[in-house]
Amino acid sequence: MDNVLIELKHLKKYYGKARGIEDVSLKINKGEIYGFIGPNGAGKSTTIRTIIGLINKTSGRILFDGKEVDLSDTNIKKRIGYLPSEINLYPEMTVREILNYHENFYKEDIHRRRKELVKALKIDENKKIEDLSLGNLKKVGIVLALMHNPELLIFDEPTSGLDPIMQNVFHDLLLKEKSRGTTILYSSHVLSEVANICDRVGFIKDGIIIKEDSMDNIKKDNYTYLKIRSSEIDKIKKELKLRVVKDDKDEITFMNNLKANDLLSKLSKYKIDNLLIEEIPLEDLFINYYK
């Protein structure tokens, strides 16, 4: 328990009769990057907004470092950095004015950290917020989330708008934060990002966590694409009992997790015209959890 920074217990949020999240329970350990993924409407953003107190939960518990969260306590809020999927800042202010304003919320001297981040992300502090592109606005949001050295970072679709080079810079920043012991909740639709930087992943569907696992275990899952051409396809389908990905008359593609010896033993009974086994992309492997 001592290693857990944030814990959700049976978190529920309803908007009247409409479901936001139904039953979200998870633990995020200190110093890990936890990937939070799911289709649109699954409940990712609702969960995040409930954690940070932008919306009130219907029921359930939120614990921060073992203690019930009271988001009226500004000391807890100072320990959290948050980057929303959509950033809204005062449009008439310059980037410098926004960052100066943010600095004033903290007694600690965070100016040096701010300058480091501005330099790394190549931000022009003289520009007005209203003149920024989506990518540059997102970079300002990243600085605002990171500059006060929070213990917990929460990112909701953080790389939308960032070019590939700046995405790499951002990921490097996150890995440095992790090396310092910072805990990160990372919600994204970009599954390759989740695969590359996250330690564990939680899958949410219809407001419920349906699976949690480490990235190492997910990558070890023995799934392949199995493509078979045969005049006995119907018999092969019944024999293998695998999920069909694509079915084109005499050729069929399965998602396969059978061991090689078992697979060959089952297929040896049938006439096979062509057989192809391919490694499955991680994106497709993630999607498999929602089938």
Image (spheres, rainbow, N blue to C red):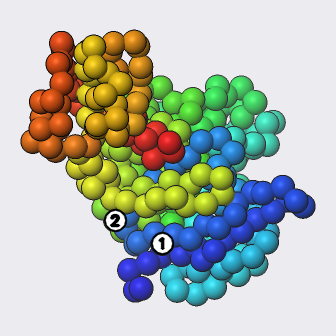
- Residue 236, above or below 169: above
Q: Which mark is residue 37?
A: none
Q: Is residue 214 left or right of residue 278?
A: right
**Label 1 crowd bin: few (<14), some (14–19), many (20+), radius 10 Å:** some
Q: Residue 72 appears at what percent x and percent y?
A: 76, 78
Q: Nearer the viewer, mark 2 or mark 1?
A: 1
Please report the residue visible at 52 percent of the width from the left and 86 percent of the height from the top: 66
Label 1 SS: strand
Please report the residue visible at 81 percent of the width from the left and 63 percent of the height from the top: 14
**Quarter residue 282 falls in:** top left
Q: Residue 146 appears at what percent x and percent y?
A: 52, 56
Label 2 SS: loop
Q: Which is more N-terminal, label 1 or label 2?
A: 1
Question: Can residue 23 be seen in the rendering of this structure?
Answer: yes
Where, quadrant-wise, is the N terminus in this rendering? bottom left
Q: Residue 267 appears at what percent x and percent y?
A: 17, 31
- Residue 198, above or below 269: below
Type of amino acid under label 1: Lys
**Label 2 crowd bin: few (<14), some (14–19), many (20+), radius 10 Å:** few
Q: Is residue 263 left or right of residue 26?
A: left
Q: Is residue 144 left or right of residue 165?
A: right
Name the residue tied to disc 1. Answer: 27
Name the residue tied to disc 2. Answer: 180
Question: Can residue 53 be seen in the rendering of this structure?
Answer: no
The mark total stands at 2
